[in-house]
Image: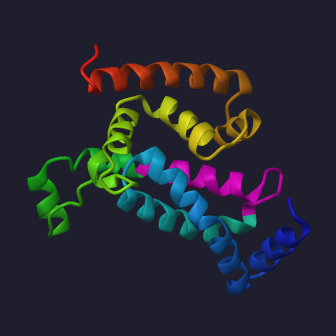
Amino acid sequence: MLVNEQHTIDLAKEGDHDAFARLMSTYQDRLFTSLANSIGCETEAEDVVQETFVNAYLKLSGFRGTSSFYTWIYRIARNVAATRQQRLKSTRSLDVALRTMGQEPVDCTPQAVNALENAEQANDLATALQRISDDYRTVLVLREIDGFDYATIASLLGIRVGTVRSRLHRARLELGRAWRQLKGNE
């Protein structure tokens, strides 16, 4: 951890709102990108990032510095995303969503998330990525999109490096299978 970052964290722990804002600005884009790729919906990723920073602010005194700040906040984000996913499962119906939210739900299909604005190949890849299991997709996104090494991924997810390797291998196999099915080759 950088000395300057540790100083900023210490200030934030002491109640310096500007220091916490600096931490947010340092990590929010990186966290959003990772979550958007993992979750598959930019709108949901924005909500998760916002809720994550609220939780992080409330729990900041519990940050001991045994891991990097990003690792700590990423774990909070994964927990927030999992909790929100459980809550959202009960509102899958459009009618239920309309009654609950008072509006039509946001379209979170891979087509709506297309980061390259209607580039067909990127759209197909996003669709295939959403067809693989969450555990595999998360490891694949952290490695291939976010560029983390195996040890960092293991730390972020609280699993062993060997498990990261295994999940990454299986994720690539599942993604290949999903891609072939999408293209009608299987």
Residue 100, compared with residue 131, is above or below; it is: below
Q: Which quadrant of the structure image shows residue 184? A: top left
* Magenta part, dominant SS: helix
Q: Is 135 contained in the magenta span?
A: no
Q: Position of residue 18 (x, y in %)?
A: 70, 86
**For residue 91, side relative to residue 180 (left or right):** left
Residue 45 position within the rendered picture, expressed as x and y whole percent measured from the top left: 43, 58
Q: Residue furthest left?
A: 95
Give the color scheme: rainbow, by chain, secondary structure or one colour: rainbow
Q: In the image, what residue occupies the spot 63% across and 72% down?
A: 24
Q: Which residue appears farthest toward the right when viewing the image?
A: 3
Q: In the rendered image of this protein, does residue 119 appear above or below residue 176?
A: below
Does residue 186 appear to the left or right of 134 in the view shown? left
Q: Is residue 179 above or below residue 120?
A: above
Depth check: 87 or 173 in front?
A: 173
Residue at coordinates 29% horizontally, 21% vertically from top-left? 181
Residue positioned 36% across, 62% down in the render: 43
- Left or right of 136 in this view: 2: right
Residue at the (17%, 57%) spot, across then down: 97
Q: Which residues are magenta?
A: 62-83
Quadrant where the N terminus sits is bottom right
Which one is in front, 125 or 168? 125
Q: Is residue 78 magenta?
A: yes
Q: Is residue 82 visible?
A: no
